[in-house]
Image: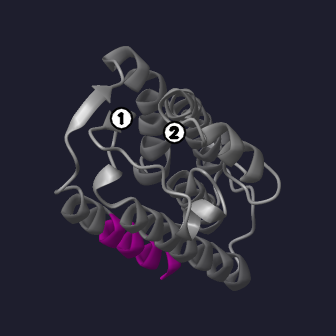
Amino acid sequence: MSRAIIATLWLAWAVIWLVAAGGAKTTRRRETLRSQALHRLPLLIAAVLVFWRRPLPPPLMERFLPATPMVAALGVVMVAAGLGFAVWARWYLGANWSGTVTVKVRHELIRTGPYRCVRHPIYTGLLLAIAGSALVLGEWRDAVAFGFALLALIVKSRVEERWMDETFPEYQAYRQETAALVPFIY
C-alpha cells in the first residue's frame, strides 16, 4: 500500500512539475551540456535505482530496514512533505525557474517563502522525498540512490551558487544568512 502511495505522490509531482514548466522568463545564460551531464547522470542513476525494480546484484536488493508499518508511514510522510516543499519552492520561483542552471533576463533573487529557510529548497524537498522513498522501499539500492541524488544536487547547487554570486551583489550576504540544503546545518 505504501509503495502505491509514494508512486502516486511522485506521479502527481511530475504532472505538477510539467504543467508549471511553462511561462518561464527568457534565458540569458545556460550551463553547458557537460555541466548538465555532471549532475544529470548521477540523478538518472538514482532514479533508475529507485524506480526500476528489476533484479540487481543481491547485496543491492537486501533490506537495510525492516518493513514495518511505522517505517512505511514515516517514509510516506517524508515523500509527501518533501515533494510539497519542492512544489512550494517552485511556485515561489515563478518565472525565474529552470530545469537547468540558468540566468534569466530580469532574473530576481528570491529570498522569501521556502528560500528564507534554505537557498535550494527544491533540492531539499527532493532529497527528503528520495529519503522517504528509500525508507518505504527499504533496499540498499534505495540508500545508494539517495547518495547519487545527494551528489547530483550538491554538484548542481555549486554551479548555481557560483552563478548567483556573479549575478547578484547581495548573494554573498544571503549565503552567510541562509543554509544551502538543511536549515541551520548546511
10 Å crowding of disc 1: few (<14), some (14-19), many (20+): many
User: Mark 2 or mark 1, which is nearer the start of the sequence?
Assistant: 2
x, y percentage for residue 44? 41, 37
- The answer to whether residue 118 is above or below residue 176 is below
x, y percentage for residue 152? 54, 34
Identity, as a three-letter code, of the amino acid under mark 1: Val
> Is residue 81 covered in magenta?
no
> Is residue 11 covered in magenta?
yes
Residue ID at (23%, 56%): 21
Q: In the rendered image, which quarter is residue 4 located in?
A: bottom left
Camera-nearest label, 1 or 2: 1
Residue assigned mark 2:
56
x, y percentage for residue 49? 49, 44
The single residue placed furthest to the right in the displayed view is 185
Residue ID at (41%, 49%): 108
Residue 133 visible to an observer of this rendering: no
Q: Specify the principal SS of the magenta part.
A: helix
